[in-house]
Image: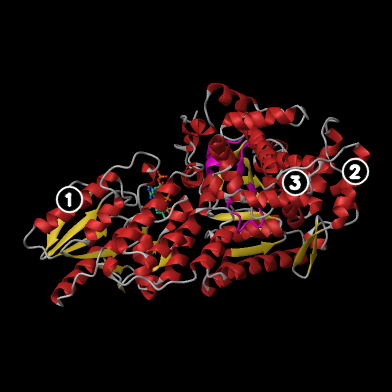
Amino acid sequence: MTDMVAYETHGAVAVLRLQNPPVNALSQAVRQALMQGMDRAEADPGVRAVLIVGDGRAFIAGADIKEFGKPPREPHLPDLCDRIEASPLLVVASMHGVSLGGGLEVALSAHYRIAQPEARIGLPEVHLGLIPGAGGTQRLPRLTGAKAAVEVITSGRHVPADEAARLGIIDRVEAGDPQAVGLACAQALLASGAARRPVSEMPAPAPIDWDATYAKVLKKGRGQLSPAQAVRAVQASAELPFADGLAAERRIFQELMATDQRQGMIHAFFSERAVSNLSELASVAPRAVEAVGVIGGGTMGAGIATSALLAGLSVVLVERGQTAAEAARARIAGNLDGALNRGKLTQERHDALLGQALEVVTDYAALADVDLVIEAVFEDMAVKTAVFAELDAVCKPGAVLATNTSYLDIGEIAAQTSRPSDVIGLHFFSPAHVMKLLEVVVPDQTVPDVVATGFALGKRMGKVAVRSGVCDGFIGNRIMRAYRTAADHMVLDGATPFEIDAALTDFGFAMGPFAVSDLAGLDIAWAMRKRLAPTRDPRERVGRYPDTLCEAGEFGRKTGKGFYLYDAGSVEPNPEVMELVMAERAERGITPRGFSPEEIQRRYMAAMVNEAAKIVGEGIARRPLDVDMVLLFGYGFPRYHGGPLKWADLQGVDTVLADIETYAREDDFFWQPAPLLRQLAAEGRCFDDLNKAPQT
Ligand code: T1G
């Protein structure tokens, strides 16, 4: 046997053991070796059963995603599954770790399935813009029924072993060495004279209301194709003979393989893993962090403290006075209660975190032994520099001093300390214990091992950490300001905020920019506009209608009124807004014009792409994929587009540049094409070419 699949016999059982680290992905070589293993077992006169088991930490994590987009090579996974199922031998799969996608499909083509208690199974292909393509949509429903199969497949979730047993997906959960447990199972089946049990020969599932299910899944997908298409594939398992159902699944799978959404989602899958792998840090050891200090126990500080506690770190949180300290502790307790209610925490761990791991104090002296401090106080330079002066005096040598500032100059903050090379920006997104994005903001004077420490802390907290250079707004907020400005200009020129929100939800956002502003609080952007006003270029167009709303104390959801009216669960456009907008248009001498949803989307995305290209070109972001991950994990960008720069590649960089040059003829101040965009278009290259280039 090849080293991809080891072959050994134990009595009448042939063991095929996959050895393709790290997760036994079903590469062509593995598929080939499994085919050969089945041939060898069937040619072995002493063999009456086959056990399939995985080496290492997983049974099989699925098809080899790295092969997608390349010409498929035989043996194809569906053929392998059919080959396993059709074997005259009794086939048992013994699962541990994860059995996902094609990995579960291999197990479903076995005749019996046994799993470890901690094992998880799933068909997550929808998260890659696909559907199961090796029989999963035909075999799973025969075991679980259509309703459960639709839920498992369209959610793409990981199903714990005990639930999988209840659903009928696996036959038994038994702790032990997966191979030993599998062998015992196979031998017991042989001893009892158990028959082969091909799933494909089981009765087709009873029908459900397919059209209603399809419509519900389509709506929930917010424009994503694959979950709804998976419903149709499961429907085929109920309405067609097995072979025809397989053919229907194959057709849908291949159609989805050709979509932009598949490219976008696989880009997101690999980028999420690549974004924190920076070559500049490859040989840099992070400093050890076990105890963290947090300064400020407001929403952000309490969220950061919660995230650190959940990561197993001890936390010392400092507030100014006893009342604020008690309020901070209550906020953290509330956050942990939420984690407990969501099943992310046991009561015992909840109590231990609050009881032992967390200390809330009012005296900086308690920070003397922490390894890293994160400041999350009011966004004011004087306040922050005072905090850092205190930290410098109290914290031990080698402690990392981090600020959570959203836009203040970290270099200026660092200059207040005797250790500027140990100062870094760790920009969390609220709520910090929920949002996965962490911008690691690196001023010039910060030393590499402090940067590595920021990334290591992010990984430990389960964040997607992205490196950012220092500029106003770093990566995410700077880009957000650009696309919000484009939206503002469209309102001044004739679109309504409500049309814009509708167009962007059609694009795949959960909420449009104006609804998001209402949610965050209109006063936040108002404060930013006031901060930037003194240095604003007179050529910059900025609508005054949001300021008027704020001056009237209308800040959005928290006041019940903003761009929308919020009343007892109902959300309606605020009619006052268009009165303000029409008055401002008249004052500015603007004759309003209509904007189609398509034009709204293209302008909004052009602004996003253009600013992102400037950020990559200036080196604020290391690669285009870094920007894509910021927008996916911090700003709700629809994952099936892959991120703004992946979207631009899929549209064609030259097409986006042409849009920007068209818009520049109306406003050549806001619409200044990014040099990098021009360069890529001129060279016939795309942003992904930069992702693949060796990191300098
Ligand atoms: N193919 C290729 N490489 C994979 C892989 C896969 N399926 N899964 C993981 N890797 C790599 C990953 O890129 C990383 O590489 C390393 O393994 C560790 O992964 C026909 C068509 C399995 C839960 O969608 O969900 O089957 O960065 O860092 O956090 O119906 O990886 O080290 O170079 O994520 O412990 C369906 C995708 C495929 C599962 C492990 N399967 N993988 O998580 O480690 S489509 C999936 C995961 C399919 C069939 C269809 C996770 C994991 P590197 P990691 P982890």
Residue at the (73%, 31%) spot, across then down: 663
The residue lying toward the viewer, choosing from 113 and 7, is 113
- Residue 396 in percent (x, y) is at 60, 48
Which element is circle 2 on? helix
Query: Residue 264 shows which numbered tag?
Result: none
Looking at the image, is mark 3 or mark 1 earlier in the sequence?
1
Q: CB under 8 Å between callouts 3 and 1?
A: no
Q: Give the number of the mark in front: 3 or 2.
A: 2
Give the vertical position of 57 relative to 191 (above or below). above
For mark 1, does the 10 Å Cα neighbourhood hold few (<14), some (14 to 19), or many (20 or more) residues? some
Alpha carbon separation for disc pair 2 and 1: 74 Å
**Residue 430 magenta-highlighted:** yes
- Give the vertical position of 237 relative to 496 (above or below): below
Residue hosting label 3: 384
* Count of number-bearing discs: 3
The part of the chain drawn in magenta is 427-454
Q: Which residue is mark 1?
A: 36
How crowded pointer 3 is (Cα within 10 Å; few <14, some 14-19, many 20+) is rated as many
Is 395 one of the magenta-colored residues? no
Q: Position of residue 130 (x, y in %)?
A: 44, 52
- Asked whether, in this view, residue 177 is left or right of residue 67, the answer is left
Q: Which residue is mark 2?
A: 584
Q: Would you say the beta carbon of the disc 2 residue lies within 8 angstroms of ligand 1?
A: no
- Say whether marks 3 and 2 touch (CB < 8 Å): no
Q: Callout 2: 10 Å neighbours few (<14), some, many (20+)?
A: some
Q: Mark 2 or mark 1: which comes first in sequence?
A: 1
